[in-house]
Image: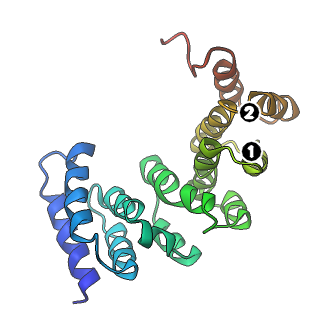
Amino acid sequence: MKEADRLAEEIGTRLAQLPDPTTPRLRAVRREYSRLLSRASPDLVVQVAICLAAQPGAGCRFVAYEILSQHKAAFRSLTAVQILNLGKGINSWGAVDCFGCYLSGPAWREGLLTISVIQGWAKSKDRWWRRAALVSTIALSRRAAIGDSAMTVGVCASLASDPDDMVVKALSWALRELAKKHPAEVRRFLEHHQHALAARVKREVQNKIATGLKNPRRS
C-alpha cells in the first residue's frame, strides 16, 4: 500500500472511531495529522487529501480539505485537475461549502483556477457544482481586490434565474458577502435581474444591505 493510501486509511479509521464527529473533534484529528505532515512533500500531502476525500466516512472531506488549506506548499502546488478530483462526489450543502470555502474559492483567488473553470461549474447539470461556483466567490468577496467583484457578479449573473433551492441559497450568500464591501454594485445587480431572481434572494440581500442582517426579524 502506498504511503498516501495508508495515511488516508489511518485518518479515516480515526474519524470513524469518534463517538460524536463534531467540528472540534474532527479538527483535533486534523491538527494531529497536520503536525505529522508538516515536513512532508507537497505531493504526498495532496495525495493523502485526495484519497481521504474519496472515503465515505463522516468528516473525511472536511479533514482532507483542512489538511490542504493548512499546508501552504501543498495548497500552492494544486492543479485544476487535482482540485476537480478533490470535489468529486460532492452531494450535500456541507460538502460543497467546505470544498468552496477551503479549496476552490481560495484556489481561484490565488490564481490556481481560472474564471472559465468556475463558469463551467456554473453551467453544470449537477446542482452541487453550480452551488460550488457560487460558494467559490466568497473568498474573492472577502479579499475585495480590483476585478474580484466583476468576476463574482459574472458568476452570480449566470445563475440568477436558477430555480434550484440549493443554488438559490448560495446565490443569496454570494450576493450578501459581496454587499459587505460593494453594496452599490449589488443594488445594481438586484435591479438588473429583479425579474429573474427568487424572492428569497431579493429579500435577504436587501435586508443585508439595509440592516446588515439576513433576517432582521429573527434577531
Q: Looking at the image, can residue 22 be seen?
A: no
Sequence-earlier tag: 1 or 2: 1
Residue located 75% across and 42% down the image: 160
For residue 167, which quarter of the picture? top right
Relative height, residue 142 to residue 5 (above, below): above
Q: Nearer the viewer, residue 32 or 216?
A: 32
Measured as percent of width and height from the top left, residue 82 is found at 50, 76
Q: Looking at the image, can residue 110 be seen?
A: yes
Relative height, residue 25 to residue 183 (above, below): below
* Gap in angstroms between the C-alphas marked 1 and 2: 8 Å
Residue 135 tag number? none
Q: Which residue is mark 1?
A: 149
For residue 2, which quarter of the picture? bottom left
Q: Which residue is mark 2?
A: 182
Residue located 46% across and 60% down the image: 90
Outermost front residue: 39
Q: Helix, strand, or loop for circle 1?
A: helix
| Three-letter amino acid code at the position of disc 2 | His
Q: Is residue 9 left or right of residue 166?
A: left
| Three-letter amino acid code at the position of disc 1 | Ser
Residue located 48% across and 11% down the image: 219
Measured as percent of width and height from the top left, residue 53 is found at 36, 67
Q: Residues within 10 Å of mark 2 (few under 14, many from 20)?
A: some
Measured as percent of width and height from the top left, residue 84 is found at 54, 71
- Applied colour scheme: rainbow
Measured as percent of width and height from the top left, residue 12 is found at 22, 66
Relative height, residue 123 to residue 98 (above, below): below
Q: Nearer the viewer, residue 5 or 73?
A: 73
Q: Nearer the viewer, residue 205 or 58?
A: 205
Dot 1 and dot 2 residues touching (CB under 8 Å): yes
